Image: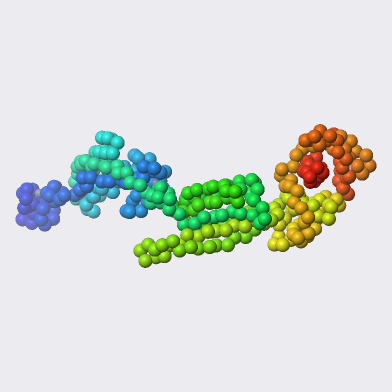
Amino acid sequence: MGITDRFCPKCGQPTEKEGLCDRCRAGGLQWFSCEHRVESIHCPACGSLKQAGVWSDTERVKDDIADELVRNSVHVHPDVKFPDLKIRIRDLSQNRSRAYVTVSGTLYGQQVEGACEIDIAWVKEQCDRCNRISGSYYEGVVQVRAEDRRPSPYEIKVAAALAEDAESSLQTGGERLSFISDVTETKDGLDIVVGSQHIGLLLAQKITAELGGRYTTHPKLVGEKAGRQLYRITYSVRLPRFQKNDVIRLKGRYAEVLQVEPHNLRILDFSDGMVRSIREDDVEKRIGNSRDARDALVAYTDRDMAGIIDPVSSATIEHRKGKNEILEAGCHVRVLYDGDRLVVVR
Ligand SMILES: [Zn+2]
Ligand SMILES: [Zn+2]
């Protein structure tokens, strides 16, 4: 032993550096700590999770949530190298679990290990979205109506499906409050009650893009909250008088609507097979929509005439073939009625 050798002032063992030896330094340090109790807040109705005061939807299962919560509740001194946590979780009751944690690592070259227990409280709280839905909160209504008629079952179905799509894509994108709280068919059309103005506007746009027509917005002041004025907006969607595939009569001829433009219709004229544009005002009558046409059998053909069996009365009805209209005995056609008259849809 030379004259320059140093000794630990605590345990008296020789050391390489000034001051405490590594074992005494490691032994005197509280190198980790655990919180005794942690809370996880979730919504019992929809399963949403509240973290740092913010609600979000989650696909994670209880074990994963508990694991993350426990990891964030164990604090290890920054001098510890290669820290490692082993966590075992036991459910004590429906609302309480206990985590048994083993912490290990290397501190000043010494292997260290410790253990602690953390209680997890599973707290139920109604989330912001369920709170709004159960309180009948809403920010707007999308009213789907049509010009001079009631929207067809097809249009109602499309509008309702668009509402469902819009809700699920916004919810997936994290817009929790863009929900649809009610969809009701009324005698005039469809009413869609929406939780946010964003989804209301989006729906009005999507419905008119898909079915034609236009929309107007009508805000109404309903109150004030925290100095901010609260509005409820009615999105008034007006579908056009005519829809795609409507079969119409004009000047004694029949035609199908191919496209609805503002004030004009692109039609396929059944009598000559030509496509052209007409003014909406030229239409004498809308007799139906080719989606609703019925199947009928062609009994015979004779030059420019054909006999078609009426699917309702079973009587054979004479039909004058249109130009370029190919009909053969035994083939099937689709028909609509203009009063008693049978109209063959192309
Ligand atoms: Zn020592
Ligand atoms: Zn909820």
| Image position, residue 219 (x, y; %) | 50, 63
Say if residue 68 shows up in the picture: no
**Which residue is at the far right?**
303
Vertical relation: 9 (above or below) 294: below
Is residue 271 toward the left or the right of residue 114 in the image?
right
| Image position, residue 191 (x, y; %) | 55, 51
- Of residues 88 and 58, which is closer to you in this image? 58
* Total labels drawn: 0
Vertical relation: 319 (above or below) 20: above
Rendered image coloring scheme: rainbow
**Which residue is at the far bottom?**
227
Vertical relation: 309 (above or below) 196: above
Say if residue 51 shows up in the picture: yes
Identify which residue is drawn at 73% across, 50% down.
246
- Of residues 8 and 100, which is closer to you in this image? 100
| Image position, residue 153 (x, y; %) | 64, 45
Identify which residue is drawn at 75% across, 51% down.
286
Give the quadrant of residue 3: bottom left
Give the quadrant of residue 142: bottom right
- Of residues 135 and 161, which is closer to you in this image? 135
- Of residues 116 and 329, which is closer to you in this image? 329
| Image position, residue 282 (x, y; %) | 78, 59
Identify which residue is drawn at 19% across, 46% down.
110
Is residue 120 toward the left or the right of residue 178 in the image?
left
Give the quadrant of residue 18: bottom left
Identify which residue is drawn at 88% across, 40% down.
318
